[in-house]
């Protein structure tokens, strides 16, 4: 990918911060406003839960097509995603029933591509010594700089209703579109990179089918023909995708990469960890925390101040630390430390859910330890372990895995909570226990992730090409963009 113009590190990070912030608003500002959304759109918690799952599903689909950014330009792809997010915020603000709201949330979910694209662009334009610190900074922004957005959303939802929250998201999206379009350099189209349209479309339909079945389990039931049909159909499409990728000249994904330990264990980490944390923080805790019958009885503002803000503050502390010390302590070690801490917090929370101070400490701890430490490490590992011939492969797959995990966790939480009797204390406790079990699976997967400096490499991964060099981690890396030099990735 060739850059038409040059960009300073300040302009690069400014544009990426605005892009990530616009998506982070769409994610975090919805959480404290969720009960207000349910009340304002007809009181159907299942339908709003489905809309949240569609938000995650859209992110998975957008990352499936992320290789198109190599062909048509990363700036163009990012701007297009931000425009779709702005349209989604507009639809959510105008929606008077769950259907239109779900469409809006789906469009907003496309903005998740700002995260993998930011990781790729910082690695492309910044020298290795600055990459870790920049990744920590962007992770901090993605996790909410201080929780002020969640606090504001809670106050607005209590005072004016949920619609004003989405109008603010729309403003943020528009600002991000203008900033990215003006500050990021244009990418020169590369005609040699012909998209694997067949592979992308089949993979997209397979993921949609799987996530549709998972997202509707709470409504259809696990034994429903619709659930079984979508799950089996999705798995069949994924099998077809693998068969096709083995035969095409320019595959979307090298199947050999998926079999490598440099890929599949790392992808399982966010699937299970995001499943546990998103089911907890995006669905269960907002409902339990604001339930005046069996829950904690907090208002939207109180929930944001006591639960959402502490998580964001800790994220702000942990993410820059992770990015700054990663080269000294190791990306893999950071990943495992965060996963162990998250698992402990989730287990304690499942046992002491009715205790407010335990909810505050453990929810904030679980969120910060994964998103701040393990999430930052996972994104760094995705860049460092991605095969040399496709720098966007593993970051795209990682972002897709985050989205799949989010959809899985929300859908599982909805299904388990409904199956255990809905809004009762045993139902809430049992649901948190199931989500804690997912964190254990994430930890087990994390132990299998190789260190980037290990000798295990994919075939041909140690070859270098013109304008490239091998780092001390054994990963090929493009030369940083100099003041007057063109860049090739």
Image: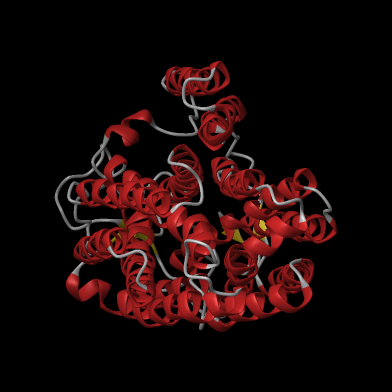
- Vertical relation: 481 (above or below) 445: below
Picture coordinates of residue 340, whole percent (x, y): 21, 61
Q: Nearer the viewer, residue 334 or 186?
A: 334
Picture coordinates of residue 201, whole percent (x, y): 61, 28
Q: Residue at x 84, y 53 (%)?
A: 96
Q: Is residue 206 left or right of residue 243?
A: right
Q: Is residue 382 visible?
A: yes
Q: Residue at x 81, y 55 (%)?
A: 91
Picture coordinates of residue 187, whole percent (x, y): 64, 58
- Vertical relation: 200 (above or below) 149: above
Q: Residue furthest left?
A: 455
Q: How is the image coloured?
A: secondary structure
Picture coordinates of residue 378, whole percent (x, y): 34, 58
Q: Nearer the viewer, residue 245 or 221?
A: 221
Q: Nearer the viewer, residue 17 or 59?
A: 59
Quadrant location, the N terminus = bottom right
Q: Is residue 376 left or right of residue 113?
A: left
Q: Is residue 7 visible?
A: no
Q: Quadrant of residue 156?
A: bottom right
């Amino acid at each position: 990918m060739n850059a038409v113009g040059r960009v300073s590190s300040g302009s690069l990070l400014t544009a990426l911060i605005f892009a990530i912030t616009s998506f982070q608003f769409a994610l975090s500002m919805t959480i404290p406003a969720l009960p207000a959304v349910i009340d304002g759109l007809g009181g159907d918690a299942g339908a709003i839960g489905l809309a949240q799952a569609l938000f995650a599903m859209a992110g998975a689909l957008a990352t499936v097509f992320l290789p198109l950014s190599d062909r048509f330009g990363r700036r163009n792809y990012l701007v297009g995603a931000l425009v779709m997010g702005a349209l989604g915020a507009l639809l959510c603000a105008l929606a008077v029933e769950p259907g239109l709201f779900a469409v809006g949330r789906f469009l907003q979910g496309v903005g998740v591509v700002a995260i993998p694209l930011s990781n790729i662009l910082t690695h492309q334009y910044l020298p290795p010594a600055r990459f870790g610190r920049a990744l920590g900074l962007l992770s901090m922004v993605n996790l909410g700089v201080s929780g002020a957005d969640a606090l504001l959303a809670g106050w607005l939802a209590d005072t004016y209703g949920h619609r004003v929250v989405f109008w603010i998201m729309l403003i943020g999206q528009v600002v991000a579109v203008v900033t990215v379009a003006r500050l990021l350099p244009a990418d020169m189209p590369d005609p040699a990179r012909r998209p694997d349209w067949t592979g992308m479309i089949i993979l997209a339909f397979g993921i949609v089918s799987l996530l549709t079945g998972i997202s509707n389990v709470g409504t259809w039931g696990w034994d429903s023909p619709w659930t079984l049909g979508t799950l089996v159909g999705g798995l069949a499409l994924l099998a077809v995708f693998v068969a096709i990728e083995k035969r095409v000249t320019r595959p979307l994904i090298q199947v050999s990469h998926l079999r490598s330990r440099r890929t599949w264990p790392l992808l399982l980490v966010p699937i299970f960890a995001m499943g546990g944390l998103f089911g907890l923080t995006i669905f269960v805790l907002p409902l339990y925390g604001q339930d005046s019958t069996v829950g904690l009885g907090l208002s939207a503002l109180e929930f944001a101040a006591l639960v959402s803000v502490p998580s964001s503050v800790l994220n702000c502390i942990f993410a820059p630390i992770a990015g700054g010390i990663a080269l000294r302590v190791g990306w893999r070690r950071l990943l495992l430390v965060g996963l162990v801490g998250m698992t402990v917090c989730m287990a304690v929370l499942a046992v002491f859910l009715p205790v407010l101070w335990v909810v505050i400490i453990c929810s904030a701890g679980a969120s910060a330890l994964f998103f701040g430490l393990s999430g930052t490490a996972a994104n760094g590992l995705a860049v460092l372990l991605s095969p040399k011939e496709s720098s966007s492969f593993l970051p795209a797959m990682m972002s897709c895995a985050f989205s799949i995990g989010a959809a899985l966790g929300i859908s599982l939480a909805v299904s388990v909570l409904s199956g255990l009797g809905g809004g009762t204390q045993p139902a809430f406790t049992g649901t948190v226990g199931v989500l804690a079990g997912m964190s254990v699976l994430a930890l087990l997967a994390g132990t299998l992730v190789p260190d980037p400096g290990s000798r295990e490499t994919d075939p041909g991964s140690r070859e270098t090409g013109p304008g490239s060099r091998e780092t001390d981690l054994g990963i090929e890396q493009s030369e940083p963009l100099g003041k007057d030099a063109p860049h090739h990735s």
